[in-house]
Amino acid sequence: MAFASPQVVLASGARGTTAGTAGSATSVSDVGNQLCLALNVTAISGTPNLTLSVQWSMDGVTFMTPDPAADAFTAVTAVNALVRVFEMKAPFFRLFWVISGGTPSLTFDVTAYVTP
Amino acid sequence: MSLDRSNPRVVLAAGTVAGGNPGGTLTTSQIQLARTSERLALLIDQSNDCPTTHLGNPVAASLSMSVEWSPDGTSWYQGDSTDSVTLPVTKNGANLTSTLLTVKGSFYRLVFGAQSYDNNTSVSVSCTFTITVTEFDPTAGK
């Protein structure tokens, strides 16, 4: 049984210390309750520390971070392929990431899909 | 939430975890969910003797089992800490371990690894598990 088609929210690319957002106003399906995000880190240089989180929006314009606990991956410091599931909190979401560390660079992409 | 019990199937008939430090892994074939399930319950039954030996002497060891997920059967991703369990390995004993997972993809596979509790020792483990997977589908019966 397959779920809704996976959607690339953030295409693969090398990213440095600048914080970023992606997938703004990405509408999620109403057929499930869980948003799965598949993070694929394919290359690193320096000593990077990637914090990737999800922000939610009711209108696709104003985005909010869940409180008290953010919907976030644990910090990523190495090449890896990880999936995390987040309970959906609004019709729209976007990714928000911050990269820190010593001369850091990570090449990564993110794919989203919805499960029940 | 209704319960749907999938047909039992053999996904890993027999295999060997490769040696080395920290040791190799053994991965099952991929399994596709039978339904649009929300949870997976895994019941891991070690009902037989699982001898572990080191230089002819029994030592303590454990097996770890983690679940990897895929949305398409091609790209595989590690889950979070809830997707990993440690399986105690005992001689002349029986262990029953269960875990409840949140579904993170349409496909999953099981990855086994072995560890010794005694550092710097090479351990041989021979163990058989029966793993029963039950899918929980929130839409079943509606």
Image: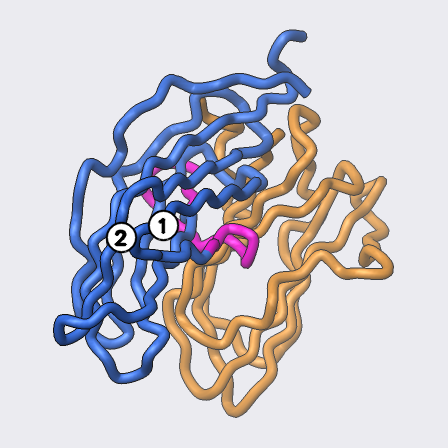
Q: Residue at x 53, y 91 (%)?
A: A102
Q: Which chain is orange?
A: A
Which chain is disc 2 placed on? B
> Residue B9 lies in magenta, yes or no?
no
* Residue B19 or residue A65, whichever sits in front: B19
At which x and y percent is residue B36? 54, 23
Can residue B131 be seen in this snapshot?
A: yes
Residue A52 relative to residue B109: left or right = right
Chain B, hue in figure: blue
Q: Residue at x 44, y 57 (%)?
A: B86
Circle 1: element type: loop
Which amino acid type is marked by label 1? Answer: Gly
Residue B32 relative to residue B43: left or right = left
> Residue B76 lies in magenta, yes or no?
yes
Query: How far apart are labels 2 and 1 at the CA level?
Result: 8 Å
Circle 2: element type: loop
Q: Residue at x 85, y 61 (%)?
A: A68
Residue position for label 2: B50
Judge whether B27 appears above or below A7 on screen: below
At which x and y percent is residue A111? 51, 47
Q: Residues within 10 Å of mark 1 (few under 14, many from 20)?
A: few
* Residue A76 or residue B97, whichever sits in front: B97
Q: Residue at x 54, y 56 (%)?
A: B80
| Region rendered in magenta | B69-85
Judge whether A22 appears above or below A90 on screen: below
| Residues at marks 2 and 1 touching, judged by CB atoms closer than 8 Å | yes
At which x and y percent is residue B117? 36, 74
Which image quadrant: the N terminus of chain B? top right
Residue position for label 1: B93
Which chain is disc 1 placed on? B
Which image quadrant: the C terminus of chain B? top right
Residue B108 in which image quadrant: top left
